[in-house]
């Protein structure tokens, strides 16, 4: 087994899983638009598929090593593992809610669970990232181990997690707000903001890659 | 397990062990983390693998201990 194959496999699986699940969610939306399935079934289907997406990304999160650059201090592995577990449990809760609960309840409860999970993970990661940055500034050992392979992998992981974050937050907002017009307006603004942030992320990652 | 504990299980020098660990870490099979003065190595598992391991351990299954190959 080559090193490249072993280290890239989780990233490939996560990317393929994310794309596959996104395509299924789009298929539900399209089927609803052309009238093959009614709106209730489509909403349930999309909720189930997004739950599956959360499980897939959560499952691979510890292997993606998104916090690898901050591994100069103890706890980053535990943070990634805890985030993965939280996402998997959230995804399972979404699947259960959209399978068995009344649709209105499922939408609201799943959105609240999703927002809580994302908030906890974001706070936890921000704290670790801050500590990692402080330690890197002090030039402690272990932070700058970055081969061409791991740098490329890290860029793909960055884009993947950003796309997942966008899909997850959009789903939470759509499910939480009942009024369709307000939800649509908000999500179009979110799309705009995410596009700008995505462009910034792309610029930073590509600039860092070019410098190396 | 810490680097010292792992090194005790094999009849190779510590620098050789260190090189092997570096390869395994680069391949994404293990993760290492500094805890105080020692470096701790763990298997890098997905959540599902972690859950399955916990599940099997709950029913009494244990990871097989490495045999000492030192003579």
Image: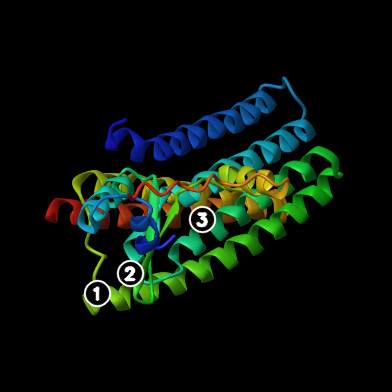
Kindly identify which numbered label has been placed on residue A91: none
The N terminus of chain A sits in image quarter = top left
From the viewer's side, name the closer residue of A68 and A191.
A68
Q: CA distance from mark 3 to mark 1?
A: 38 Å
From the viewer's side, name the closer residue of A62 and A200.
A62
Cβ–Cβ below 8 Å for labels 3 and 2?
no
In the rendered structure, the answer to whether residue A136 lies left or right of residue A87 reads left
Say which of marks 3 and 2 sits in front. 2
Characterize the local packing of mark 3: few (<14), some (14-19) or many (20 or more) Cα atoms within 10 angstroms: some
Kindly identify which numbered label has been placed on residue A72: 2
Q: CA distance from mark 3 to mark 2?
A: 34 Å
Residue A5 at what x, y percent from top left? 32, 33
From the viewer's side, name the closer residue of B19 and A92.
B19
- The secondary structure type at the circle numbered 1 is loop
Residue B53 at what x, y percent from top left? 61, 45
Residue A9 at what x, y percent from top left? 39, 35
**Residue holding disc 1:** A140
| Disc on the earlier residue, 3 or 2 | 2
Characterize the local packing of mark 1: few (<14), some (14-19) or many (20 or more) Cα atoms within 10 angstroms: few
| Disc on the earlier residue, 3 or 1 | 1
Visible residue check, residue A77: yes
| Disc on the earlier residue, 2 or 1 | 2
Subunit ID for the residue under disc 3: A
Residue A131 at what x, y percent from top left? 38, 76
Subunit ID for the residue under disc 1: A
Cβ–Cβ below 8 Å for labels 2 and 1?
yes
Characterize the local packing of mark 2: few (<14), some (14-19) or many (20 or more) Cα atoms within 10 angstroms: many
The residue under the point 71% across, 49% down is B58
Kindly identify which numbered label has been placed on residue A190: 3
């Amino acid at each position: 087994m080559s090193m490249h194959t072993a280290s890239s496999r989780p990233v490939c699986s996560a990317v393929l899983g994310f794309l596959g699940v996104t395509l299924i969610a789009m298929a539900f939306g399209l089927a609803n638009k052309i009238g093959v399935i009614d709106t209730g079934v489509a909403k349930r289907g999309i909720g189930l598929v997004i739950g599956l997406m959360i499980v897939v990304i959560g499952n691979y999160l510890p292997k993606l090593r998104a916090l690898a650059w901050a591994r100069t201090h103890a706890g980053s592995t535990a943070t990634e593992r805890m985030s993965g577990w939280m996402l998997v449990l959230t995804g399972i809760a979404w699947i259960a809610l959209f399978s068995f609960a009344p649709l209105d309840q499922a939408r609201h409860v799943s959105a609240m669970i999703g927002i809580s999970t994302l908030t906890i993970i974001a706070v936890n990661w921000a704290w670790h990232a801050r500590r990692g940055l402080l330690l890197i500034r002090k030039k402690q050992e272990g932070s700058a181990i970055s081969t061409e392979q791991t740098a490329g992998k890290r860029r793909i992981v960055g884009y993947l997690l950003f796309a997942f974050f966008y899909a997850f937050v959009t789903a939470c907002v759509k499910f939480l707000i009942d009024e369709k017009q307000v939800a649509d307006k908000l999500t179009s603004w979110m799309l705009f903001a995410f596009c700008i942030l995505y462009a910034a992320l792309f610029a930073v990652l590509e600039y860092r890659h070019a410098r190396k | 397990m810490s680097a010292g504990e792992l090194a005790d299980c094999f009849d190779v020098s510590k620098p050789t062990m260190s090189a092997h660990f570096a390869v395994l870490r680069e391949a994404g099979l293990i993760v290492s983390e500094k805890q105080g003065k020692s470096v701790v190595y763990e298997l890098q598992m997905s959540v599902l693998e972690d859950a399955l391991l916990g599940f099997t351990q709950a029913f009494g299954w244990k990871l097989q201990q490495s045999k000492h190959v030192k003579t």
